[in-house]
């Protein structure tokens, strides 16, 4: 069986843009759902809707794969599943280690989607001696003292960091020194890595903050919309003062302060 250490995806060597690479898993997820329903072909419009992108962008992305579909028929679902899986490197076995088996690490270990997507959890690693040997998701937790030997023995090139922020950089350094070249970071900190090491950061708090921004903006738009009818009403004649009346009232030569001040 091939391992992650001996085979690498060809996306960079073929010049596929990173933005396209980021969308390939979305297409694969939509195509897999179609395949499970035994749908033989799909149009670019239907697939784009299912993946949440526009059809022109989808066709452009697929052109990098050399897949253009058939006019009047669409794309062959099974072939696209294979083609995208191959491009993403999912037609082989990728051993993964998860470091930090707290609540989040244990949840990741129990996630059932890894195996069906080409990833095999080779080991669970934690710094707490009390955790050593305890079974999580059918695997015994190993102590961090074994980290280097685990990576070497299993040919691991992908590491998942689910430790507290304070320990993440040290764990990252050890993973890289042992030969790991791709890291998925769940720790709430930015990791420093040498050139040639890829890091993908997953920060749930940042995602929630972005959603909070959009919620605040929507609330502000709703408030503004609700106030617009009142603001649009013309001022009554009694409220309009002439320059002379303004001077008489001690308001200065321009009378009342205008509704809109000059810049």
Image (cartoon, rainbow, N blue to C red):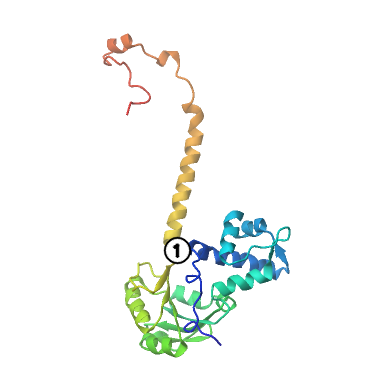
Residue 97, located in which quarter of the rendered image? bottom left
Percent across and percent down for residue 39 are 73, 66
Q: Residue at x 32, y 72 (%)?
A: 166
Percent across and percent down for residue 126 are 40, 82
Q: Residue at x 60, y 64 (%)?
A: 27
Q: Is residue 253 above or below residue 209?
A: above
Which quadrant does the N terminus fall into?
Answer: bottom right
* Nearer to me, 160 or 9: 9
Q: Is residue 67 above or below residue 135?
A: above
Q: Residue at x 42, y 61 (%)?
A: 205
Q: Is 39 left or right of 255, judged from the image as shown?
A: right
* Nearer to me, 10 or 181: 10
Q: Which residue is mark 1?
A: 204
Q: Residue at x 35, y 78 (%)?
A: 171
Q: Is 130 left or right of 45, judged from the image as shown?
A: left
Which quadrant does the C terminus fall into?
Answer: top left
Mark 1 nearby-residue class (10 Å; few <14, some 14–19, many ≥20): few
As helix, strand or loop, the secondary structure at mark 1 comes to helix
């Amino acid at each position: 069986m091939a391992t992650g250490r001996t085979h690498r995806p060809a996306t960079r060597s073929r010049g596929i843009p990173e933005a396209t690479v980021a969308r390939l898993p979305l297409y694969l997820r939509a195509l897999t759902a179609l395949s499970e329903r035994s749908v033989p072909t799909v149009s670019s419009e239907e697939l784009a809707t299912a993946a949440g992108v526009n059809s022109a962008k989808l066709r452009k992305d697929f052109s990098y794969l050399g897949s253009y579909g058939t006019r009047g028929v669409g794309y062959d679902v099974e072939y696209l599943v294979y083609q995208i899986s191959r491009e993403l490197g999912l037609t082989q076995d990728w051993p993964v280690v998860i470091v930090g088996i707290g609540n989040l690490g244990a949840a990741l270990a129990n996630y059932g989607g890894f195996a069906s997507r080409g990833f095999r959890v080779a080991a669970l690693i934690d710094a707490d001696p009390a955790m050593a040997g305890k079974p999580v998701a059918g695997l015994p937790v190993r102590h961090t003292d074994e980290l280097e030997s685990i990576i070497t023995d299993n040919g691991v090139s992908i590491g998942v960091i689910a430790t507290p922020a304070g320990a993440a950089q040290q764990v990252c350094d050890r993973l890289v020194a042992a030969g790991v070249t791709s890291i998925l970071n769940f720790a709430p900190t930015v990791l420093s890595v040498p050139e040639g090491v890829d890091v993908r950061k997953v920060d749930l708090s940042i995602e929630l903050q972005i959603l909070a921004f959009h919620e605040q903006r929507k609330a502000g738009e709703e408030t503004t919309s609700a106030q617009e009818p009142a603001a649009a009403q013309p001022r009554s004649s009694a409220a309009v003062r002439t320059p002379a009346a303004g001077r008489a009232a001690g308001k200065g030569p321009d009378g009342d302060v205008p509704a809109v001040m000059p810049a």
